[in-house]
Amino acid sequence: MATPSRESVQVADSERFMKLKEAFISKYGAPPAFYARAPGRVNLIGEHIDYCGYAVLPMALEQDILAAVTPTQTKLIQLANTDPVYLDYNVHINEVHIDTAKPRWHYYFLCGFKGIQEHFNLIASGMNCVIDGTIPASSGLSSSSALVCCAGLITMVANQKVLSKVELAEICAKCERYIGTEGGGMDQSISFLAERGTILAKAKGLEWQKLLKLGDLQTELGVSLETMISTVEQILHPEPYSREEVCQHLGISQEELCSSILSQNTQDVTSFKLYQRAKHVYSEARRVLQFKTVCDETPANALQLLGELMNQSHVSCRDMYECSCPELDQLVDICMQSGAVGSRLTGAGWGGCTVSMVPTNKLDSFLTKVQEVYYKADVQRAALQTPSLFATQPGGGAAVYHEA
């Protein structure tokens, strides 16, 4: 399997590499041994379905995490960041602790380190490292996962180990759970590879205890997504299910519900919108396939079709999965008023980013109009403040660089 690329770079020809090199020398007194990069991502369509067993359509960004690194024999991990907001951090490799209650920037790095360390059962070397990031923090563009991936790549290289891109993505998806993130692997996969629901199963007479994902249920039934959507509409009711009702349908006790089905984060939930969540997952999975088909077949009205799918996705995220917020809804409306053919939230939601599809020849006017409409609109400025607008092109996958 393919491994992350290793490339030579003329550091003197890149302002960003030069500034990072200078920051490293200023911090540690000598140039770095190598550089590592992991990109952020934007998900074009397919929200909250990867961990349900369905495909999504993310795109790696030009915006990334770039690190300068030198392995050491000190057994210390010494971390610094070019952004002074993020304080330096040092820890012995045998004392790595990740506090899920108080996430700090360096804990994401330690997730990647710990994942590789445990995979190889390493007595790892220490390292000096300076991080530079261009992915806006808390924006839904996967800055944290990019840092985890970059750290995993760094730890592999610093300890002279070899893994394929797929293996690295799998390790980094698992190790991010050290900090409490329970994703489906989309962020990590696109960073390296760029170039739960049981009442339905019970009703269908299946061994529901063995089916942890809505995608598993469809596979077990062997039916289309259209049929799954109809099944949801026929079996589940739109009104929220109480804990007692769930237990009654499944034939289990409240204790079994808590111990076998609910996660640590959902132990206190008292009602469940099963109809809405399941319908979103299956309809969103269908939209992803429709989106890919349009991209593959490129009909004359491709842009219109893709835009409509993005708009439908946002409506479903807003109304069925309820992962949007008033500010994101307002930004989507503003983007559509300003010339986007499609716009939707991207990432987990409840804040963060929108992604809009805009024809290249209308990009400049779009960016100008968004700013104009924003300032004219009755925007909830205390929460939203001034939106950060940028255009981006697809970026490459994670890579290691050595100075030429």
Image: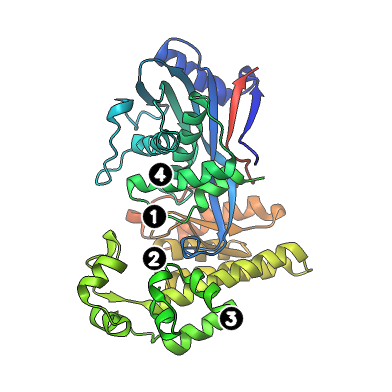
In the image, taking residue 5 as reference, residue 203 lies left or right, namely left
* Label 4 packing within 10 angstroms: few (<14), some (14-19), many (20+): many
Nearer to us in this view, 369 or 229: 229
Q: Of label 4 and label 2, which has the lower sequence position? A: 4
Residue that numbered label 3 is attached to? 226
Disc 3 to disc 1, how far (Cα)? 27 Å
Q: Of label 4 and label 1, which has the lower sequence position? A: 4
Residue situated furthest top in the rendering: 29
Which residue shows up at 36% across the image and 24% down it?
Answer: 77
Q: Of label 1 and label 2, which has the lower sequence position? A: 1
> Could you tell me the amino acid type at mark 3?
Glu
Q: Position of residue 90 (x, y in %)?
A: 31, 24
Compared to 157, does 298 lie above or below?
Answer: below
The numbered disc on residue 175 is: 4
In the image, which is nearer the foreground, mark 4 or mark 3? 4
Disc 1 element: loop
Dots 2, 3 in contact, CB < 8 A: no
Disc 3 element: helix
Nearer to us in this view, 286 or 263: 263
Residue that numbered label 1 is attached to? 182
Nearer to us in this view, 380 or 250: 250
* Label 3 packing within 10 angstroms: few (<14), some (14-19), many (20+): few
Disc 4 to disc 3, how far (Cα)? 35 Å
> Could you tell me the amino acid type at mark 2?
Pro
> Could you tell me the amino acid type at mark 4?
Cys
Q: Of label 4 and label 3, which has the lower sequence position? A: 4
Q: Of label 3 and label 1, which has the lower sequence position? A: 1
Compared to 230, does 34 lie above or below?
Answer: above
Quadrant occupied by the N terminus = top right
* Label 1 packing within 10 angstroms: few (<14), some (14-19), many (20+): few
